Image: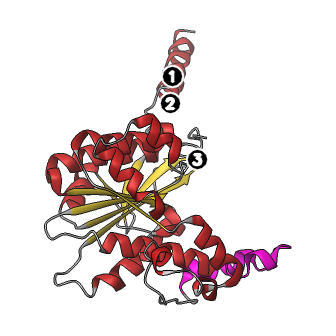
Amino acid sequence: MRNKSILFIVIGLLISSSVLADKPAYKIFNAKGKKATYKELLKDAGDSQVVFFGELHNNPICHWLEFELTKDLFEIKQEKLVLAAEMFERDNQLLLDEYTKKFIRKKDFEKEAKLWPNYSTDYAPLVDFACEHNLKFVASNIPRRYAALVNLKGFEGLDSINAYQRAMIAPLPIKYDSTMNCYKAMKEMFSGSGAMHQTMYIAEAQAMKDATMGYFIYKNLEEGGTILHYNGAYHSENYEGTVWYLKDFARKFPFETTVVTITCVEQDNIDELLEENLGKADYIICIPSTMTKTK
């Protein structure tokens, strides 16, 4: 009887230890799938001229880590740190400049800027950090009306825009490689869509976004500085999209441009990186698929 009681106690302890086991919110892996540390990621980011943080737009761990990386990079780079984001379009650059330089009030900026629905929880902390520390914040994305024009008519749709409008996009004509996996996959994804007439040029519109972001990152490169660019993971995964365009523009630069990419993925089990997620970036942040979502 005593042995049976001991057995029940042992089983109870094993169940308790399993239930109370650590549940990490994320794990970091390198491109080869080996476990990495935040310290390693931060060092590589601080040694690079451009850092792409590829987020999942509705994942709170991504947004928290973006803010933590911003703070820690600022400790390393100080005024040599520049922030940039897909979430702000080029025609909002003046508003961003006025706010970060404290020319206008926060409520006026937020009233007039084109802000994403989750701005107040996920992006306002980054913009306010730039404001507090007098950091440049680059609105890198194409104005959505011009992306919509490409989506409707292809690149030729931009032929009619004037010089003032062209200043808000990458120089035309842009290079476009329809065989690049990110564009090829997007084309295939919408090929069976019932609204094909609305999405015929969707990959070209994506390329125009990538080219514009890459161009305005390039325009803000400074030797010894670091640009931290926040974007959806799809724009920088597998070193394609915006990364490809940046490197193409940067060939004109007098010094080599070093780039570190970070991407975020969700998995049911984060102990090991799935094969499908290998090689997506220099650092892959693996987050449980059960993580709560932001709006």
Which residue occupies 53% across, 90% down?
Answer: 177
Residue 88 location, x and y as percent?
47, 57
Residue under pointer 2: 18
265 vs 32, nearest the viewer = 265
Residue 57 shows which numbered tag? none
Quarter of the image with the N terminus in it: top right
| Crowd around label 2: few <14 · some 14–19 · many ≥20 (10 Å) | few
Q: Are marks 3 and 2 in contact (CB under 8 Å)?
A: no
- Precedes in sequence: disc 3 or disc 1: 1
How much space separates mark 3 and mark 2, taking CA atoms?
20 Å
Magenta region includes residue 293? no
Q: In the drawing, does residue 256 fall left or right of residue 187? A: left
Residue under pointer 3: 289
- Precedes in sequence: disc 3 or disc 2: 2
Q: Are marks 1 and 2 in contact (CB under 8 Å)?
A: yes
**In the rendered image, the vertical position of residue 231 relative to residue 162, given as above or below:** above
The magenta span reads: 180-201
